[in-house]
């Protein structure tokens, strides 16, 4: 399941774009708000207590490192992880965007096999991100075959990270630190999504409901 669900989440996200779900910016914003709240609740309720229970104080620096890494990755993705994608129509394939999102996807996939609650958080997060990536790809002048190949490659990145971490013993002594790194990534993305969910520093009732639903759902599955 830890290998299959992230892959299927990407496929579902792409299909939602094909069938027109992403045409509504309001729907996409609500889905982003839900996913951001889900990520934040999962990090705070499940992962942070476990990380600090099984490690020494140095783990805090790994959380900070995760935040810094995500900031650096956004120099490539331009903030696509929390809803910002800008691709010119009829342009070339956005390789920087793909590389940034893929590195992010690989990192978040590393500890999934040890944390079932993280699996669901990643699945929820992948839906809006894939929808944004698919919409961006479809604006380019590349062939449909290339676009599909890029999406399939993106779908395999997170399962690849999970598989490598589960199968290569060299990573096991650093399992807590890897999880802490991912927590830092999640904290940065989730808080950015939630802060940017506010239009003119105000929240619509629908977005408040989406955030509360995301927090509550994550609490139930954690």
Image (cartoon, rainbow, N blue to C red):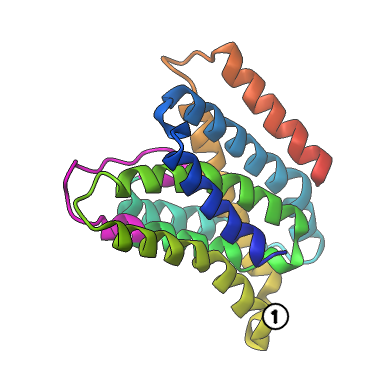
x%, y% of residue 165? 63, 77
Q: Which residue is mark 1?
A: 172
**Residue 188 visible, this angle:** no
Which of the 4 image quarters holds residue 111? bottom right
Dot 1: element: helix
From this view, report whether residue 215 is shown above or below residue 133: above
Residue located at (24% from left, 58% from top): 143
Residue located at (46% from left, 28% from top): 196
Residue located at (62% from left, 54% from top): 183
Viewer-closest of 192 and 3: 3
x%, y% of residue 221? 81, 44
Viewer-closest of 79 and 53: 79
Residue located at (79% from left, 52% from top): 49
**Is 212 contained in the magenta span?**
no
Determine crowd level at label 1: few under 14, some 14-19, many 20+ residues with C-alpha closer than 10 A: few
Q: Is residue 84 left or right of residue 12?
A: left
Q: Which residues are magenta?
A: 79-98
x%, y% of residue 12? 55, 48
């Amino acid at each position: 399941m830890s290998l299959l669900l992230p892959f299927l989440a990407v496929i579902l996200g792409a299909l939602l774009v094909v069938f027109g779900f992403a045409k509504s910016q309001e729907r996409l914003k609500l889905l982003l708000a839900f996913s951001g709240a889900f990520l934040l609740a999962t990090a705070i309720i499940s992962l942070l207590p476990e990380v600090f229970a099984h490690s020494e104080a140095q783990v805090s620096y790994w959380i900070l490192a995760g935040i810094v890494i995500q900031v650096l990755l956004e120099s490539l993705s331009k903030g696509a992880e929390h809803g910002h994608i800008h691709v010119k129509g009829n342009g070339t394939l956005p390789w920087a965007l793909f590389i940034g999102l893929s590195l992010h996807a690989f990192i978040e996939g590393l500890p999934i096999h040890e944390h079932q609650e993280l699996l669901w958080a990643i699945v929820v997060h992948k839906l809006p991100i894939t929808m944004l990536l698919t919409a961006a790809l479809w604006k380019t002048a590349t062939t449909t075959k290339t676009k599909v190949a890029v999406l399939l490659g993106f779908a395999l990145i997170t399962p690849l990270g999970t598989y490598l971490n589960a199968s290569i013993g060299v990573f096991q002594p650093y399992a807590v630190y890897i999880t802490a790194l991912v927590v830092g990534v999640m904290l940065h993305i989730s808080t950015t999504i939630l802060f940017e969910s506010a239009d003119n520093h105000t929240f619509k009732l629908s977005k408040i409901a989406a955030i509360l639903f995301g927090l509550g759902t994550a609490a139930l599955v954690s």
